[in-house]
Image: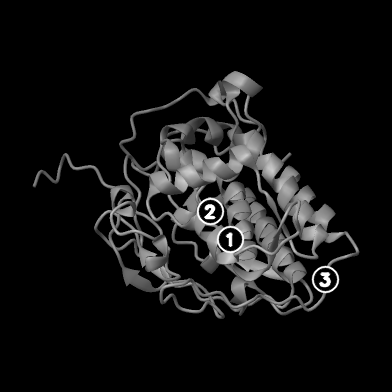
């Protein structure tokens, strides 16, 4: 092995002890509690970003419900968090947000498959704040499909939530997950949350924001990245509505074909490139590619297991020998904080 010329991704083993104790997001006592927890996690994400960290893995196991007065949800699991200020210092750039948005466009991405942004799944764009914000939308959609009742938008007939869930989250490979996300982004949804107008409105509002971030720029003009302001405004407007249902706790979820119940959280499988990612989430190692999806039939055979975080490939922005040095003024992204 030529170790001198080998290129490595920067990885660190981390253990974090937190004073705050929370419940799994899937154990919500009401849909308003679940939405509030995700909103508060986004606020925490913003505070971390202002301090120099981009979380890069908003997913079901990393957003917890807090039974307290000051906040209802919080974000944990920082093993994919990235210090963008330190990265800029290593390459001689100022530790400023404008410099970071220009620099990270050249590098890799990470995350948990089901909640990764469509752009990150399909291309090798840098995993930035706008992608974490989109992950929060996929997380909300996942919780809704798994743990609430949906009805058809016109007939109001109750739908099979297991089938709806598989239609959106049944893929375990990157290509399949991307295609399902693109279908949602392009076509929207044809269902509503039963007897829950505030949650339905929030899903519709967030869909529009995600649609604008991912639409075809040749047809619709420049894409409009998600920002903290746009996403938090949608959450806050929905939470301010007075007609939230009460005591609509999370319904148990079990996929047909032997899947485990999810009353206390999700089980994670390792859908990676042959190695464990070092994730804090527990689960069974399971290697699977997009080609495999068409070989063994119904994705329900996966039980209720979801793919875990994937390893990052390509150059890491923390490498001291990074050669690329894009212009600080090259960013075409809007300010994510506005």
Name the colouring of the figure: one colour
Front one among 297 and 228? 297
Q: Write down the residue under mark 3.
A: 245
Q: Quadrant of residue 91?
A: top left
Q: Helix or strand or loop: what does disc 1 sit on?
A: helix
Instruction: Give neighbour class at mark 2: few <14, some 14-19, many 20+ (Cα, 10 Å).
Output: many
Instruction: Give neighbour class at mark 1: few <14, some 14-19, many 20+ (Cα, 10 Å).
Output: some
Q: Write down the residue under mark 1.
A: 142
Q: Quadrant of residue 92?
A: top left
| Residue at image point 52% right, 68% down | 61
| Residue at image point 55% right, 65% down | 162
Instruction: Give neighbour class at mark 3: few <14, some 14-19, many 20+ (Cα, 10 Å).
Output: some
Q: Helix or strand or loop: what does disc 3 sit on?
A: loop
Q: What percent of the width, then of the height, locates residue 144?
A: 65, 63
Counting labels gives 3
Q: Is residue 67 above or below residue 104?
A: below
Say whether residue 63 is visible. Answer: yes
| CA gap, disc 3 and disc 1 | 19 Å
| Residue at image point 68% right, 45% down | 207
| CA gap, disc 3 and disc 2 | 25 Å
Q: What percent of the width, then of the height, locates residue 77?
A: 50, 65
Residue lying farthest left? Answer: 1
| CA gap, disc 1 and disc 2 | 8 Å
Q: Helix or strand or loop: what does disc 2 sit on?
A: helix
Q: Write down the residue under mark 2.
A: 168
Q: What percent of the width, then of the height, locates residue 130?
A: 60, 42
Q: Dots 1 and 2: beta carbons under 8 Å? A: yes
């Amino acid at each position: 092995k030529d170790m001198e010329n080998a290129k490595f991704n920067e990885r660190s083993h981390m253990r974090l002890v937190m004073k705050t104790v929370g419940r799994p997001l899937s154990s919500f006592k009401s849909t308003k509690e679940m939405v509030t927890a995700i909103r508060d996690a986004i606020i925490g994400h913003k505070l971390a970003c202002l301090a120099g960290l981009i979380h890069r893995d908003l997913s079901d196991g990393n957003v917890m419900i807090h039974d307290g007065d000051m906040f209802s949800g919080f974000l944990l699991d920082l093993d994919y968090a990235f210090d963008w200020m330190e990265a800029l210092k290593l390459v001689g750039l100022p530790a400023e947000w404008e410099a970071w948005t220009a620099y990270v466009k050249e590098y890799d991405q990470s995350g948990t498959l089901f909640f990764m942004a469509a752009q990150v799944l399909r291309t090798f764009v840098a995993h930035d704040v706008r992608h974490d914000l989109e992950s929060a939308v996929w997380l909300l959609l996942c919780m809704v499909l798994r743990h609430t009742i949906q009805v058809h938008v016109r007939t109001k007939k109750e739908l099979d939530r297991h089938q709806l869930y598989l239609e959106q989250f049944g893929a375990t490979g990157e290509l399949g997950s991307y295609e399902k996300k693109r279908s949602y982004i392009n076509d929207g949804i044809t269902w509503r949350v039963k007897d829950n107008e505030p949650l339905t409105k929030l899903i519709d509002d967030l869909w529009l924001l995600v649609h604008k971030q991912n639409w075809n720029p040749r047809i619709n003009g420049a894409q409009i990245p998600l920002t903290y302001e746009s996403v938090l405004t949608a959450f806050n407007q929905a939470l301010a509505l007075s007609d939230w249902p009460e005591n609509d706790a999370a319904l148990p979820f079990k996929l047909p074909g032997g899947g485990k119940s999810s009353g206390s959280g999700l089980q994670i499988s390792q859908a990676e490139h042959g190695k464990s990612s070092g994730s804090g989430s527990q689960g069974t190692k399971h290697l699977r590619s997009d080609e495999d999806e068409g070989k063994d039939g119904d994705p329900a055979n996966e039980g209720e297991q979801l793919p875990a975080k994937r390893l990052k490939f390509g150059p890491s922005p923390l490498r001291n020998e990074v050669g690329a040095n894009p212009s600080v003024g090259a960013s075409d992204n809007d300010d994510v904080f506005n």
